[in-house]
Structure formats: C-alpha cells, structure tokens
C-alpha cells in the first residue's frame, strides 16, 4: 500500500493505466529494448499487479473499499486491459501469473453501478474464451487460464458461448489428460458448464443430445480410466436429477444402451462408482413409462439385480438412500414382461 | 526443464517409507532420469476419506507453489484408483520421525530455532498467497540430507480466495470472505477457534499449530499426545483429563529453554487469534535472530540417524509390539486413570514451565504470568458426544457393544468386582489402539488384529458378566441343559483356538518384520 501514498498518491485508475502501458510494452516483444530495462519493467508490472490485488481483496491492514474497487474495475474494462493481460500472461513469472489470475477472478464479480461490466466486456470480446480454453493444451498455462475461465463462465452469456462452441468437444479429451492437476481442473470447468446455468444447460442438452451423450457414454462412462468413469457417472447423476433437465432425463432413461452402460457401472468393484451409478440407475427403474426393451432387460436380470441390492449399503446410514433402494427393489420385483411367457 | 514421466512405468518403487489412512509413501527411482531418487505418495481415491475436491485442491496448490521451504510436486497422475504424487525425496524424513527415533526428549534449542525459522518462511509465503496450511506439525516438516527444511502435505489446506464460492459481487463484509468454517487438521495441533468453528478462523490458526509444533520439537511430542486424538479434541472443549500422566510428562525442563523461545511460543498460543502475531511478524522475533544454517542441522540432527526406511520399519514393529503389551501394565494404567480423573475448563500456557496446561475449574488463578485460555462450547460436546459415549443397555449381555462404549462398560464392571480389572485393562488398551487408527496411522492389518483383540476381551467380559448374573440369580443359571453346557464349552474352546491362531499370526508377522530389519541391517 505504501506505493499509494508516496509524493503524489496514485488513484486505482492510475494504477490500471500504468499497468496497461507496461502490458503494451511487454506485448511488443523483446527486440526493441535492452534486457535490463525490460527486466525492470517486468518487476514494475509485478508490483502493480500486487497493488491491484490488494485493492480488490484488501490486505492484513485494510479491508477493500467499494469505491476504489469500482474505479479500478471501470478503468480496467474501459480499454483492452483484460485482453493484454491474457495475452501477456505466458511472459510473466509464476507469482505474477497467480496475482493476475486472482485479479481477473475478482473483477468478474465487481459491480459498477449495479452492473457486472466484466460481462459486457467479455460479450464484446468473446474470442478471449478461445484463448483461455486453449490453455488446457499448454501445461504451464493450463491452471491459470483454467481458473480464469471458470470465473468467466459465471456469466450466463459467456457459458452459453462456450457450450455452443466447438470447444465443448475438446473437453472430453482435456479431462483425460495425463497431468492429473490439469485434467482435474478441466473436469471442474466441464462440470461448471453443465450445471451452473440451468436453463442454458437444459437448452444445450436438448439441442445437442445425440452427439453429446454418444461422446459422454463412449469416452467417459466407458473410459478405461477409473477417475474419468467416477467423475462422469457423478456428473451424469447431477445433470439428470436436476429438475430443469427432466426432458433430457426422460429421453436418457428410455435407451437400452444407456441402461446397459449403467448396469455395467453398477457391477464395478469400486464402491464409489457403484453408488453413483445407482443414483442414475434408479431413474431407469422408477420411470413409469418404461419402453418394452428396458422392461425385458430388467426382467432378465431381475434376480441378479435383487441380489446385488440385498447387500448394497453405504458406509454411513442414509435414510434417503435406503428408501430409494427399497423403491427400486419394489419396482423391479413387480415387473411383468410385456409379452406373455 | 525435465518432464517427469506421467505413468508408473517411468518409476521403480524401492521401499515403503510412510503410511496413512488413504495414502502410502514410497521411496522410488525415476528410470529415465538416471534413476534419481524420488518420493511417491500414492493416494487411494476410492476411499470415502479421499474427498475428490480436496485432492484436486491439493494438486493445484502444490503445482502452483514455489518456495525453497515448500515441498513441491514434480507431477501428478493416476494409476488405476490411486493418485501418484511424485515429489523430491527428502532423505531425513519428517521431524516427527527424527525426534521419535533419535530425540525422544526433544531437539536441542538451536536446532528447533533453525527448523522453525524455515517452517515459518514457508508459512509466511503460504499466507501471502492466501492459503492456510491447516495441518502444521512436526510430521509435516521434512528435512533433506543437506539440512534443508520443507513444509509438506497440503491435503487439508484451503485457499482464502477460493472459499467465497457463492455467486455475486465481493461486497458486503469482506472479512467474512476471509474466514473458513469447516473443521480440519490433526486434533493435538488444532487451534481452539478451529474446534469451535462457529465464528470461523483464518491464518492465525496455523500460528497456533506452529506454537504446538514448537512444543512438540522441544518435548518430543505435542501436549496431550498421551491421549487418543479424538479424546484430545473433546478434552479441549472440557472433558476428563488424566492428571497423573501429565505430571509425569512435566519433569524438570523448566530452565532448559531460553526466555525468547518461551516468549515466542507464548505469542503463538494466545487464545485470542487476533493477538497472535502473523507469520511475517513472528519471523522478526528475537528467537529467530541468530539462527544456525543447514550445516548445523546436518551435524546435529541428521548425523547418525537411521534411514527413513529403517525408521519406518522400526515404527511398524513398535506398533505391533505394543499390541502384545502385558495386561498387568495396563491394569495399573487404568486404575490410575480411574482414580485421577478431573474436569478441565480450558488451557493455560505456562511460560515458566513451558507447557500447555489444562485449567481446572474451582481452582484459584495463582500465577499472573499464566495466560488464561477458555473453552466454552458445551453444545459441541452434545453434538459430538455420540462419538465417544456410545450407550449400552446392560441388561442383555449377549448383545453387541459398540467400540466406543467399551470404556463405560468396563468402568461399570470394575466397580462390581475386582476380579475383572484385568479385562478392563485389556479393553482400554484395545480401545486406545483403535482410536489411534482413527488418525490413520494404522493399516488394515493392524486394525483387524486390534479389532480381534477387542472382540476377545468383549467375549471375556461377556463370560464374566454371565457368571455374575449366574451368581446373583443363583440356580436359574446353573440349571442349564447339558446341551447348552456343551455348547458353552465348545464356544470357549473356539475362542481359545481363535486366540491361539491370532497369537501365532502376530508372532509370524513379528518374525517377518525382524527378518526384514535384520536383512536391511546387513
């Protein structure tokens, strides 16, 4: 904070303008100036980012001031500062990258005259999302861009853009990257995209049902990778059990292919996967308009399923789970094959 | 920069060097990197305990931290249901294992200062980044062969910047955004406000744990570690306390430590978090002014230390042997325990004695130096009471009895008959073994054998209770049909057979360990 109260105190807007000038310089590339001068400027930029961060988050001595945050935010989005920051991020050192990520995250939630002006900016600069998503292919940038991306898709319009873009298909690969930290970050973003904005998600799933669930089943639910299957079946449950996705759910539980996949997951030796699979399987069983092929699969496997559920228990007692199980067992036990024997 | 291989084929596991509830740590070599040594932490992701979000957070934090005193991960990848975290191998192991092995009564003060200063630098960096460690203890402070010190294990760490997950602008009361409310950490080291988490806690909770860690390094173990961890948690809030054990621990160390050391710890263990210094500020404390460097630690701590592998094996054997402790010893313990139970209502950090002392109600506050530490929170006891006070209906001896309830049963029995004291002893030992496993330091095998042990003592008690009922009810009980009598005999013999088998297995295991130790000693 000291820097703020030197001979001529700098306003938050001054700091943003200074940051922007430095970014323009950094963005121009190394050829123009001497190495030492460049390093000096990089140091200055790092310091500025720290100051911006401490205005937005406060520090050990002071809480953030609403007015200062608003000034900063307004100046930040008045010009292309966000774009410059995103583009220059690979040129900054690790600590500054982290500060930038936190500043960008915070700015997404700052209101200026009760408007989220970050959202307006992103709508006009939606191609920035392409850079952020592409970050998952760069080991060094993935976690920084990933964190920013998750903050940006808090805005519904931005999330809709990403959902409807070609990028959506790439997530099926990103969440299976060998670097666990990056894969897990991509999975968190994927989940956010498919659960946060209910109406947008419902619309996306209905419009893209065929390719999306084909990919989802083959790449994720039937993946040889344990983590992928476990996360995928959990997310599937979250999506299908959401009231706003009821049309999608009805469609999903009418397919015998889907039922077959879920029954395979029920048989897994992993308890966690079994339990998550059960939460989806129960929807097939509870469906009051089961197609005949679903009924015949359930009837054919009746004794095996009932045996499975007989000693299917959670580690902790859970009334809801037991009630669900009892209902599923009743449904299956009461099934009659549509055609006579 | 060298990219560490992202699948298990790139590594060869050499030895197990640590084990927790859902993770095992190995010493291994990285094949494509001239077989350089690494440590691999293998976390079981299928266990309920390994909450996936926490694992993800740990991975992310470890990837993004960069500081000489923080243990970095080379890479993370999954191997079927396990997550492998490849890290630098710290050949000195944890400070906890160092003191257990070579400094059972604590480290010399200059060594403590050096270790703590490095740890504090790590905390200062961590806090500056907006992260809480939440599990600062000697077990998470590692030392390398060159005397460098690193803080490890971000399994429960949390980020202040991520905690405000609710949608909406960062306005209103900003301080509430900088507070966490979930309980995390290891009981002995946990700050009071972490246990009473209604009000939330922040960076200062790490400072408390840091203070406890200082005491741990000074005395060889944290305050109250003679109690099972879950009990310690409750005790902090007010519960029974074994006064005698604590007195034993006291000894004559009053003048062993410098005034500035005592003062530093006193600052950390202030009941009021806002009065504890920040990590940054604490670094400037006089205790850290003339700190020795890593060479000093190499000479005075690492010299003559068994390898990490040897120490791990040793601790395994120790745990196994403790299972076979004779029942007479425990008899004494439990008697003393029964007599000298008192309530405490809070803590004093006694600067002169350099101990964290319990405060007993109805006692005069004699010492002005003493900093009063109070714990209210009766309600917490009620919430958590179920954990320890499993209730038992004593009228049907045949019913199964919950593990936690055993102590109560044994107390009742001991009042009735002195002959049963033996059982009380064995039961409370089994109980403490099980409580220890809550903390995750015991593997499945150990768990099973201690459970079998408990089962046996429960069966013994059941028999004794049956006999007593027989005595009281007189004839009724002796008028058993012949068949019933035979059944009882068979039952008894079965139990005996089971015990023999178990003893045999334990001995075999012990033999195995001794062989291992022998071969590694060659």
Image: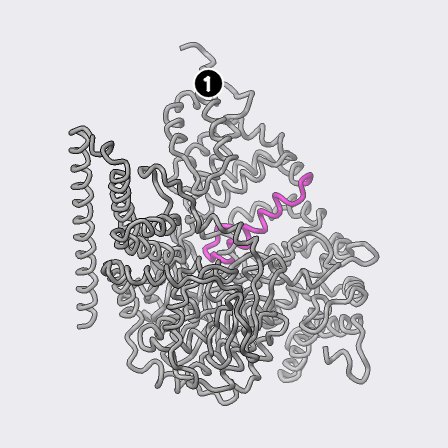
Front position in the image: A108 or B464: B464
The residue to which callout 1 is attached is A334
Q: Estimate the x, y position of residue A267 in percent, counting from the top left.
A: 39, 35
The magenta segment: A175-200
Task: Name above or below for residue B371 compared with residue A263.
Answer: below
Q: Quadrant of the C terminus of chain B?
A: bottom left
Q: Estimate the x, y position of residue B348 in percent, counting from the top left.
A: 52, 72
Q: Main secondary structure of the magenta part?
A: helix
Task: Name above or below for residue B483 compared with residue B230.
Answer: above
Asked if the stretch drawn in magenta spans residue A132, the answer is no
Q: Is residue A145 left or right of residue B247?
A: right
Q: Estimate the x, y position of residue B129 in percent, counting from the top left.
A: 59, 69
Q: In this figure, which colouring scheme has been used for the structure?
A: one colour
> Residue extending furthest right?
A113
Q: Is residue B445 visible?
A: no
In the picture, residue A340 is in which quadrant?
A: top left
Tell me which residue sits at (79%, 68%) in the image.
A68
Element marked by disc 1: loop
Q: Is residue A56 left or right of residue B322?
A: right
Q: Estimate the x, y position of residue A1 in percent, counting from the top left.
A: 72, 77
Asked if the stretch drawn in magenta spans residue A185, the answer is yes
């Amino acid at each position: 904070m000291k820097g703020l109260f030197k001979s001529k105190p700098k306003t938050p807007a001054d700091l943003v303008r200074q940051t922007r000038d430095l970014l323009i310089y950094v963005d121009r590339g190394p050829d123009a100036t001497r190495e030492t001068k460049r390093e000096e400027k990089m140091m200055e930029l790092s310091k500025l980012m720290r100051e911006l961060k401490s205005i937005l988050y406060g520090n050990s001595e002071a809480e953030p001031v609403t007015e200062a945050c608003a000034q900063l935010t307004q100046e930040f989005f008045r010009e292309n500062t966000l774009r410059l920051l995103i583009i220059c991020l690979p040129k900054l050192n690790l600590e500054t990258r982290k500060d930038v990520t936190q500043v960008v995250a915070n700015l997404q939630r700052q209101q200026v005259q009760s408007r989220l002006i970050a959202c307006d900016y992103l709508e006009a600069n939606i191609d920035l999302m392409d850079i952020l998503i592409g970050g998952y292919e760069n080991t060094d940038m993935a976690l920084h861009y990933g964190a920013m991306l998750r903050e940006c898709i808090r805005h519904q319009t931005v999330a809709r853009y990403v959902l409807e873009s070609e990028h959506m298909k790439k997530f099926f690969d990103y969440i299976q990257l060998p670097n666990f930290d990056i894969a897990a970050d991509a999975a968190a973003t994927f989940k956010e995209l498919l659960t946060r904005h209910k109406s947008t998600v419902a619309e996306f799933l209905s419009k893209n049902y065929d390719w999306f669930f084909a990919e989802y089943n083959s790449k994720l639910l039937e993946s040889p990778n344990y983590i992928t299957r476990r996360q995928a079946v959990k997310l599937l449950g979250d999506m299908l059990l959401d009231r706003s996705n009821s049309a999608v759910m009805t469609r999903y539980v009418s397919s015998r292919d889907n039922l077959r996949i879920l029954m395979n997951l029920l048989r897994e030796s992993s308890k966690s996967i079994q339990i998550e699979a059960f939460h989806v399987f129960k929807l097939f069983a509870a469906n009051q308009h089961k197609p005949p092929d679903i009924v015949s699969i359930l009837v054919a496997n009746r004794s095996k399923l009932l045996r499975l559920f007989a000693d299917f228990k959670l580690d902790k007692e859970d009334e809801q789970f037991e009630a669900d199980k009892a209902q599923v067992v009743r449904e299956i036990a009461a099934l009659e094959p549509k055609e006579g024997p | 920069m060298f990219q560490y291989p992202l699948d298990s084929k790139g590594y060869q596991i050499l030895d197990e060097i640590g084990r927790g509830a859902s993770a095992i740590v190995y010493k291994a070599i990285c094949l494509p990197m001239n077989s350089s040594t690494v440590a691999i932490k293998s976390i079981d992701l299928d266990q309920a305990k390994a909450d996936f979000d926490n694992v993800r957070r740990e991975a992310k934090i470890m990837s993004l931290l960069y500081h000489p005193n923080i243990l970095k991960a080379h890479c993370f990848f999954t191997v079927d249901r396990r997550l492998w975290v490849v890290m630098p191998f710290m050949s000195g192991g944890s400070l906890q294992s160092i003191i257990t092995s070579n400094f059972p009564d604590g480290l010399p003060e200059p060594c403590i200062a050096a270790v703590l200063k490095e740890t504090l630098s790590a905390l200062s960096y961590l806090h500056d980044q907006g992260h809480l460690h939440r599990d600062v203890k000697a077990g998470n402070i590692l030392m390398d062969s060159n005397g460098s010190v690193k803080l490890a294990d971000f399994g429960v760490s949390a980020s202040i910047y991520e905690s405000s997950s609710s949608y909406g602008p960062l306005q209103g009361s900003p301080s509430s955004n900088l507070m966490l409310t979930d309980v995390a950490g290891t009981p002995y080291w946990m700050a009071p406000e972490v246990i009473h988490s209604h009000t939330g806690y922040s960076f200062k909770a790490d400072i408390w744990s840091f203070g406890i860690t200082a005491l741990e390094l000074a005395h060889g173990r944290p305050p109250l570690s003679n109690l099972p961890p879950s009990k310690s948690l409750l005790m902090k809030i007010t519960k029974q306390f074994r006064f005698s054990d604590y007195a034993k621990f006291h000894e004559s160390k009053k003048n062993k430590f410098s005034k500035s050391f005592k003062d530093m710890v006193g600052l950390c263990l202030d009941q009021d978090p806002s009065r504890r210094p920040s990590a940054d500020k604490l670094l400037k404390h006089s205790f850290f002014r003339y700190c020795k460097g890593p060479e000093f630690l190499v000479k005075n701590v690492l010299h003559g230390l068994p390898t990490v592998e040897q120490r791990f094996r040793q601790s395994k054997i120790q745990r196994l042997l403790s299972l076979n402790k004779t029942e007479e010893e425990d008899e004494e313990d439990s008697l003393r325990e029964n007599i000298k139970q008192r309530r405490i209502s809070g803590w004093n950090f006694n600067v002169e004695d350099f101990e964290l002392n319990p405060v007993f109600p109805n006692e005069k506050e004699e010492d002005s130096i003493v900093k009063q530490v109070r714990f209210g929170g009766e309600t917490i006891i009620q919430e958590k009471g179920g954990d320890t006070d499993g209730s038992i209906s004593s009228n049907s001896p045949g019913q199964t009895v919950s593990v936690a309830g055993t102590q109560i049963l044994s107390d009742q029995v001991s009042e009735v008959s002195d002959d049963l004291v033996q059982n009380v002893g064995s039961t409370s030992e089994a109980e403490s073994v099980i409580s220890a496993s809550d903390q995750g330091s015991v593997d499945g095998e150990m768990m099973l054998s201690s459970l079998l042990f408990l089962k046996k003592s429960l069966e013994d008690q059941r028999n004794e209770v049956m006999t007593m009922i027989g005595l009281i009810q007189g004839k009724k009980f002796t008028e058993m049909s012949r068949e019933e009598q035979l059944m009882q005999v068979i039952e008894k013999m079965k139990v005996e057979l089971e015990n023999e088998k178990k003893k045999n297995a334990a001995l075999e295991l012990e033999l195995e360990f001794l062989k291992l130790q022998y071969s590694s000693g060659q």
